[in-house]
């Protein structure tokens, strides 16, 4: 397999020597990546071999919100970190092998120990169960809609919907987690050997790729420890892992913006070196990521040079495919990569922060909310109970509203039992 690739005609925008952001996102890939400050301007360089790209950005007209770096070698200067921090530009470095976020520089907006303490206690309180039900319920509803609308697999869609309904009656977070795991088995089983999940390679490259690259055979990787899904051995899983990593980086940044601790999750079990609250917040938007991947597979003819296979069979993405999907417009016309996923994450993050935040601090959160988003605000649809909506993973307001009202009652009950005055909990957003 090739380890490097040159851009093709469809990637003419990436073959330019000049780097420019799209939707505020600039993706850097290759070897010898440099991010530094020169004469008061941010200078960035990336590329492979002699195919180098560079960009220079002034403080007033930079147009940057995210720098996403996927590379083996290079450096970021201290001056560049300070330059980006002052101008509210986040830097995310993804591991080049499994695309897992391994470094992030995120300008923080909120640092409240009271919020983190309340977040830590939420897992053992009724509010934690309510939040877990909402997060997982919206995810399962979205995946059921995807099975029905995209894959036309009605039996599996009904099974996932039944599990989503049972999730509403879960008595503990552990029970909710088990129901979600059962739904995941059913969901990913429905992807196996489907034409919609099969990678289409150019005819001249068919003899260059292994047979198992052209089909999806489950999320579990034979190369990962503990039967996990890291270190994918198939291109579809490599694309899913990369897109999930972009969404995780956005969720991590969102947590820090509102003051949540990214490591204190509710749904995911505690472990070292993972941002489990960020992973919890990703749950409602996972169907959006998976829809994006299915549309990409349907619309794109891949080349063998889009992927590389390591010595152990681990498949990873290569440029310009990886670079373009960090900030691309899906050819169906909808923005579905990092900028779009950020917009779907923020309502969840603001409401989760509001659910445990002391009342006095909620006013600061509400005032800071316009600065958190990017671009024009998206209207938040209302979740309908009469019939499953076409894209239910977007319709989260009523579910989160019920959670916030439950939190308000729990907060007032706790303060009343302690002899403290009762304050109404305010929630961010409409």
Image (cartoon, rainbow, N blue to C red):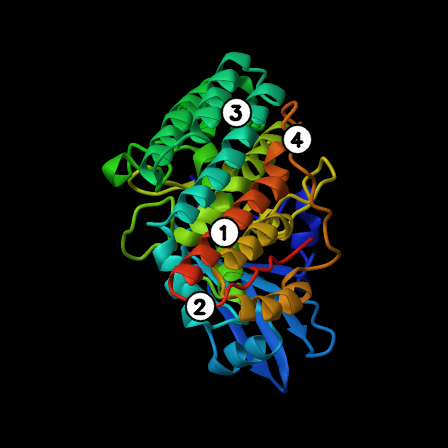
- The first of marks 3 and 1 along the sequence is 3
Q: Quadrant of residue 398?
A: top right
- The first of marks 3 and 4 along the sequence is 3
Using residue 235 as the reference point, say whether residue 40 is left or right of it.
Answer: right
Q: According to the image, label 1 marks what residue?
A: 409
Q: Is mark 3 in CB contact (under 8 Å) with mark 1? A: no
Nearer to the camera, 404 or 366:
404
- The first of marks 3 and 2 along the sequence is 3
Nearer to the camera, 317 or 242:
242
Whether residue 298 is visible here, answered yes or no, is: yes
Mark 4 surroundings: few (<14), some (14-19) or many (≥20) residues within 10 A: few
- Calculate the distance from the C-alpha at mark 3 to the C-alpha at mark 4: 30 Å
Mark 1 surroundings: few (<14), some (14-19) or many (≥20) residues within 10 A: some
Whether residue 30 is visible here, answered yes or no, is: no
Q: The N terminus appears in which quarter of the rendering?
A: top left
- Calculate the distance from the C-alpha at mark 3 to the C-alpha at mark 1: 46 Å
- Calculate the distance from the C-alpha at mark 4 to the C-alpha at mark 1: 24 Å
Q: Position of residue 23 (x, y in %)?
A: 69, 57
Taking the spot 48% from the left edge, 79% from the top edge, the residue there is 77
Q: Determine the secondary structure under disc 3.
A: helix
- The first of marks 2 and 4 along the sequence is 4
Q: Position of residue 154 (x, y in %)?
A: 55, 14
Q: Position of residue 287 (x, y in %)?
A: 55, 35
Q: In this picture, is 155 found above or below 131?
A: above
Q: Determine the secondary structure under disc 2.
A: loop
Q: According to the image, label 2 marks what residue?
A: 420
Q: According to the image, label 3 marks what residue?
A: 197
Task: Please identify, in this view, whether the residue under mark 3 or under mark 4 is nearer the observer.
Answer: 4
Q: Is mark 2 in CB contact (under 8 Å) with mark 1? A: no
């Amino acid at each position: 397999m090739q380890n490097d690739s040159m851009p093709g005609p469809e990637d003419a925008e990436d073959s330019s020597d000049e780097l420019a952001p799209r939707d505020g996102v600039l993706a850097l890939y290759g070897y010898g990546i440099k991010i530094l400050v020169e004469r008061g301007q941010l200078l960035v360089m990336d590329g492979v071999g002699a195919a180098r790209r560079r960009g220079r950005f002034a403080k007033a007209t930079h147009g940057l919100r995210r720098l996403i770096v996927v590379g083996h070698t290079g450096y970021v200067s201290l001056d560049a970190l300070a330059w980006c921090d002052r101008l509210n530009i986040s830097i995310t470095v993804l591991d080049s092998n499994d695309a897992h976020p391994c470094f992030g520089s995120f300008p923080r907006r909120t640092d409240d120990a009271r919020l983190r303490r309340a977040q830590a206690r939420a897992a053992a309180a009724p509010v934690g169960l309510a939040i877990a039900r909402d997060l997982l319920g919206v995810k399962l509803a979205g995946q059921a809609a995807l099975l029905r609308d995209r894959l036309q697999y009605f039996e599996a869609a009904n099974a996932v919907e039944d599990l989503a309904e049972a999730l509403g009656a879960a008595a503990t977070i552990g029970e909710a987690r088990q129901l979600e795991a059962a739904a995941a088995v059913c969901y990913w089983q429905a992807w196996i050997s489907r034409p919609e999940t099969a990678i289409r390679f150019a005819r001249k490259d068919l003899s260059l790729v292994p047979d198992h690259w052209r089909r999806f055979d489950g999320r579990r990787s034979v190369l990962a420890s503990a039967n996990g899904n890291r270190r994918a051995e198939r291109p579809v899983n490599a694309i899913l892992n990369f897109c999930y990593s972009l969404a995780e980086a956005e969720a991590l940044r969102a947590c820090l913006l509102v003051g949540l601790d990214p490591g204190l999750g509710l749904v995911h079990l505690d472990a070292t070196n993972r941002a489990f609250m960020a992973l919890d917040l990703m749950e409602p938007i996972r169907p959006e990521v998976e829809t994006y991947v299915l549309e990409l597979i349907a619309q794109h003819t891949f080349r063998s040079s889009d992927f590389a296979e390591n010595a152990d069979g681990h498949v990873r993405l290569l440029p310009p495919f990886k670079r373009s999907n960090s900030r691309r417009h899906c050819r169906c016309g909808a923005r579905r990569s990092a900028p779009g996923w950020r917009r779907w994450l923020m309502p969840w993050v603001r409401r989760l922060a509001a659910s445990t935040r002391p009342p006095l601090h909620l006013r600061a959160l509400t005032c800071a909310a316009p600065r958190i988003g990017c671009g024009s605000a998206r209207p938040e649809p209302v979740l309908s109970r009469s019939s499953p909506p076409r894209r239910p993973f977007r319709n989260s307001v009523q579910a989160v509203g019920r959670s916030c009202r439950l939190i308000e009652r729990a907060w007032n009950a706790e303060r009343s039992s302690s002899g403290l005055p009762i304050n109404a909990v305010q929630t961010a957003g409409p």
